[in-house]
Amino acid sequence: MLVLTPAGAAYAGSGPAPAPSGKSDRAAATAPTAQGNPESKRAQAAGVCADAYQIGATGYIKRSGATLASVKQFYSPSCNENYGYLWVWDSFHTGAKPYDVTLGVFSYDRDAVVGKLTRNDTTQQEFWTQGTATANECTAAVGTLRVEGAPLPNQAASEKRC
């Protein structure tokens, strides 16, 4: 089969670089993101190693059909640690009243939550656990978010990883 491509066609990665966003490269590198940025200020404060990357599928905390937050698990090869990550979605975070959040890494081997983090009465958007020595165990990140006025939190877990 013969395919003709016009000489002026654009391909992914070709063309001029995008215009700068006005932020410094360092500021962009340390900004929190919905995907999880191990170099964000909150990640650094929790001691997350810079080479951490997401493992397993994301879990979603939902309430009445609306997604409130994402729960992810990260792994760092250089530190040999797992981390829990929770991101409160903009659609809920914008205009939300303070809420309660818990986050941790669930060890199926120990039947326990490791590295548990609790924040009450917060409007923070990004949450990281400290590193957990669970790299050789079956684990999942687990998180809850309790909306003001609700008696119980909504919860989710990322995919189980062994």
Image: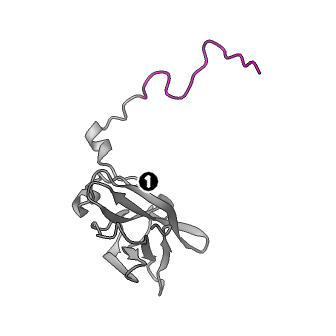
- SS majority, magenta: loop
Q: Residue furthest bottom?
A: 151
Residue 7 within the magenta-colored segment of the rendering:
yes
The residue lying at 29 percent from left, 37 percent from top is 25
Q: Is residue 138 left or right of residue 132?
A: right
Q: Residue furthest front?
A: 136
Q: Amino acid at mark 1?
A: Gln
Q: Is residue 3 left or right of residue 71?
A: right
Q: Residue furthest top?
A: 7
The residue lying at 27 percent from left, 67 percent from top is 130
Please tell me whether residue 111 is drawn above or below residue 60 in the rendered image: below
User: 5 and 90: which one is in front?
Assistant: 5
Q: Is residue 117 visible?
A: no
Residue extent of the magenta highlight: 1-18
Quadrant of the rendering where the N terminus is positioned: top right
Quadrant in the picture for residue 140: bottom left
Please tell me whether residue 50 is drawn above or below residue 56 in the rendered image: above
Q: Which residue is mark 1?
A: 35
Residue 29 in the image: x percent, y percent? 31, 44
Quadrant in the picture for residue 122: bottom left
